[in-house]
Structure formats: C-alpha cells, structure tokens
Image: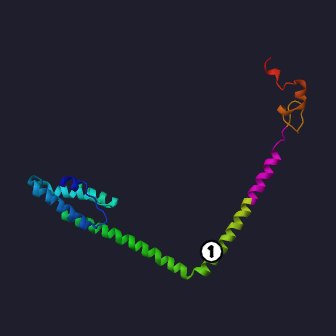
Amino acid sequence: MLQQRFYAYHQQEEDLISCSLNMVELYDKIIQHDASFAACRDAALKGRFAESVKDEGLRRELRRLNIESPALKFFELRDRAVHWLGRLVADKKSAINQEVQSASLEAGDSTSDLLEVIKRQEAMIEKQQQQIDSILSKSGNTSNKYRKPLQCWTCGSTNHINRNCPQRRMENPRGRDNTLNE
C-alpha cells in the first residue's frame, strides 16, 4: 500500500521542496517494512520525482538530467530543479514587469499619442479606399469593354440565350430538342 501511494504521488499545491520531502518520507517508510528497497532508494526517488512535478517543462528537464547524469544524487537533482524553476519564475516576473512598465509609459503619453495614431490610421484608410476604388473602376471598365453580349444561337437576339428562345419553343412545343436524337 505504501508503494502504491509512493508511485501514485504527484505534486499538488506544495512547493518542490515539500514535495520531495514527502516522497522521501514515503520511501523511508517502505524501507522500514522491507529493507531490500534501500539499494535503489536514490534511483527510485529521482525517477518518481521527475514524474511527480506539476510543471511540464521541469518534468522534461528532470528526465533529461536523470538520463544524462545517473550519478547525480536525489537532493542535488531537487536543488537543480528548484534553481531552474526559480530562474523560470524570475524570467516570467521580469517579462511581466517590463510589460507593465511599457504600458504605464504609454499611458502617460497616451492622449496626444493616441490622437496622432488615430489621424495616421484615418489617412491610411482613406488612401487604401482610394486604391480600392481605383482598382474596382479599372477592372469594371475593362471587363465590360472587351466582353461580348450574350446572344441566342437560334435567332441571334441579345435579349435571351438559346435555351430560352421563343422560336425554338414554337418549333418544338414540348420543349425537347429532337435534333440530338437523329
């Protein structure tokens, strides 16, 4: 039952140090019941610790460290994880601080800068609309200039096409063209 708890253990809302200490405590209880588990204590703790952490990036890093440095002790591995996670959190905090600072700087000059940006955008939109109108007027003129009007093949009229020709209907009252069957 202790083994099941150990291998099912996952980091919850606790920090990495508390998580590692809880795992050590569980494994030491296992050793108290069966001393044969003492030989693989470090390897079992390292492997399980790598699988039990919440952060996926840290989990990958711990797996990599376990493979690349098999002689690394469990507590050294844990200390590297804490350092790596601390550096990651510090990087995230500094990125957030930079965003907040840039947003506050922009907010200070926002009134005059905002009006200037709006004016530039309005000018760009007006220029783009002129380009669109120019393209549409050119494309509309060229397509109508070179396109022949539709013409009926039976009577030559431009008011309708062949399938709607009234002369054709008069010749064949049922609306079928028997010339195809001959």
Which region of the structure is painted magenta? 133-150
**Res 20 quadrant in image:** bottom left
- In the image, residue 104 sits, relative to residue 173, either above or below, namely below
Q: Residue furthest top?
A: 182
- In the image, residue 179 sits, relative to residue 28, either above or below, namely above
Depth order, front residue of 65/128: 65
Residue type marked 1: Val
Callout 1 crowding tier (Cα within 10 Å): few <14, some 14–19, many ≥20:
few
Q: Secondary structure at mark 1?
A: helix
Residue beneath the point at 54% across and 82% down: 108
Find out whether residue 134 is within the magenta segment: yes
Residue beneath the point at 26% across and 65% down: 81
**Residue 98 x/y as whole percent:** 44, 75
Residue 72 in view of the camera: no
Q: Main secondary structure of the magenta part?
A: helix
Residue beneath the point at 60% across and 79% down: 113
Residue 161 horizontal side relative to residue 84, left or right: right
Residue named by callout 1: 117
Residue 11 horizontal side relative to residue 110, left or right: left
